Image (tube, grey):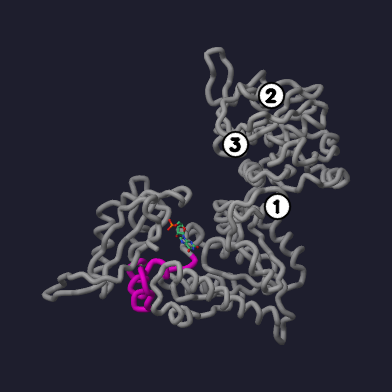
Amino acid sequence: KILILDFGSQVTQLIARRVREAHVLSEVHPCDVSDEWVREYAADGHLKGVILSGSHASVYEETTDKCPQAVFDLGIPVLGICYGMQTMAHQLGGKVEGGHKREFGFASVRAHGHTALLKDIADFTTPEGHGMLNVWMSHGDKVTELPPGFKLMASTDSCPIAGMADEARRYYALQFHPEVTHTVQGKAILERFVLGICEAKPDWVMRDHIAEAVAKIREQVGDEEVILGLSGGVDSSVAAALIHRAIGDQLTCVFVDHGLLRLDEGDMVMEMFEGKLHAKVIRVDASELFLGKLAGVSDPEAKRKIIGGEFVTVFKQEAAKLKAGDGGHKGATFLAQGTIYPDVIESGGAKSKKAVTIKSHHNVGGLPEQLGLKLLEPLRDLFKDEVRELGVALGLPPEMVYRHPFPGPGLGVRILGEVKKEYADLLRRADAIFIEELRNFKDESGKSWYDLTSQAFTVFLPVKSVGVMGDGRTYDYVVALRAVQTSDFMTADWAELPYALLKKVSGRIINEVRGINRVTYDVSSKPPATIEWE
Ligand code: XMP
């Protein structure tokens, strides 16, 4: 395995992810572990290499964090990245100076010599025959003098020592960030370090993560009981399946059905978790409560607040009951959440002590404190696609795990203006037809349009238009189909769905859903439109 020592960079978990992608087990630990801890950690001989992460701090000013000296006595390869390089240089007798200007962004790095790390890895070669790498840099300080035994491995115009190596001791260091995708060859470089230099065996698979995670959950929970809010979304579903695998009936899931879910969604969630996995699930049918609270409310933000607020109230009531326990139960002490790594980063709660806060996330913090429960977050270190992979490995159906995102307020923000049960029922049926046909229609490569789009759904417009059906005139509601392609949901393009698909969907909705007589297609991109209509 590979040990990653975290000095507080926002992207430390990305290093871990790259190592996992190379099919090697990695563990992230804080940089201030003791020398003894390091020696003990390496004692069983499984540790093949150490990576020192970046940091937000500079070696001299904001931090005195050092790499435990014992790391350099293990006789195994060490890779320092950014701050990790600087502390390596500093601790091994080189010199680091405060940069006069902060360097942030793309840079072209020239590789020197033929180090085992960078040999034959290049984006392009200069006419003089130098290998060049397009990389991402973000640093203020820099190494200005190589430690004894080191040679220059890479340089840029503004950073003459952008990489250094002591090949005899197998110490390597890079000022740039190989873990981010902006560094085109970054994955190849980290793979070279882990597989080539550390000679770690590429035998780790997601299934192994299940065993590790299960052991960790069992250790953390012991014989106590856990509550989990199951929404039917990917993250909470995978968390539930994983925790259930670990502790079985010590887990109780609470599924609050607010009546604004997709067609048959509530039944499908129950069928999956109660029927197939035999997990304990309490289904709270709160649709009347929610619809009652929403009556007469048409402002989108007001609707969101009501739905979010009621959700928390209902969930808290159930959780309080479970906490109190009953005849056979002593009461829950843990609240599990499907927090994933991007949520942690966004809320600034990264394990790294020094990661800066960007924005707070509803998933992190709040509820457990209010409920007086301990927090269990088994997906905290994983990225979305890894969570999906884990879900499949746990036996969840791929259709569930690869579903488009669905907003917490559900159909509440897809029914424009006031939410009524009649509208929700019409919308559910129309949307199910749209999704079914997206799954049916394939492109030339055989991929379905559901998989070719990032998010697709139907919006209910509470206006009536005139139509004709058979001999009669109709005066019914309108729906809009929305399908977008995006990589980050911050910007999005409307999807160029085939006309044949649109035609089929429109024909089916108007024929099968009495009450809707007109279907439109939304051809607005984000920005200036948003993905949802409210
Ligand atoms: P917009 O409409 O802002 O949507 O372009 C971007 C992404 O966020 C989702 N979304 C929400 N998710 N609660 C959620 O959990 C919300 O209130 C909410 N509003 C929008 C939306 O579905 C899209 O994926």
Labels 2 and 3: the sequence-earlier one: 2
Residue located 50% across and 75% down the image: 257
Specify the principal SS of the magenta part.
helix
Q: Is residue 511 visible?
A: no
Q: Which residues are magenta?
A: 408-431
- Is residue 393 rendered to the left or right of residue 417? right
Residue topped by disc 2: 161
Residue 30 falls inside the magenta stretch: no
At which x and y percent is residue 372?
71, 73
Marker count (numbered): 3
Q: Which mark is residue 326?
A: none
Q: Nearer the viewer, residue 494 or 505?
A: 494
* Residue type marked 3: Lys
Q: Amino acid at mark 2?
A: Ile
Asked whether residue 210 appears in the rendered view, the answer is yes
Of residues 431 and 352, the one drawn nearer to the viewer in this rendering: 352
The residue shown at (64%, 30%) is 101
Image-based side of 428 in relation to 313, left or right:
left
User: Of marks 3 and 1, which one's residue comes earlier in the chain?
Assistant: 3
Judging by the rendered image, the residue that carries numbered circle 3 is: 187
What secondary structure is found at the residue carrying circle 3?
helix
What element does badge 2 sit on? loop
Work out which quarter of the rendered image holds the C terminus and state it.
Answer: bottom left
Q: Which residue is at the far left?
A: 471
Residue highlighted by disc 1: 351
Badge 1, how many Cα within 10 Å: few under 14, some, many 20+? many
Tell me if residue 248 comes above or below residue 4 in the rendering.
below
Q: Is mark 1 within 8 Å of ligand 1?
A: no
Q: Position of residue 208 (x, y in %)?
A: 67, 53
Toward the viewer: 42 or 287? 287
Q: Percent position (x, y) of residue 4?
A: 73, 43
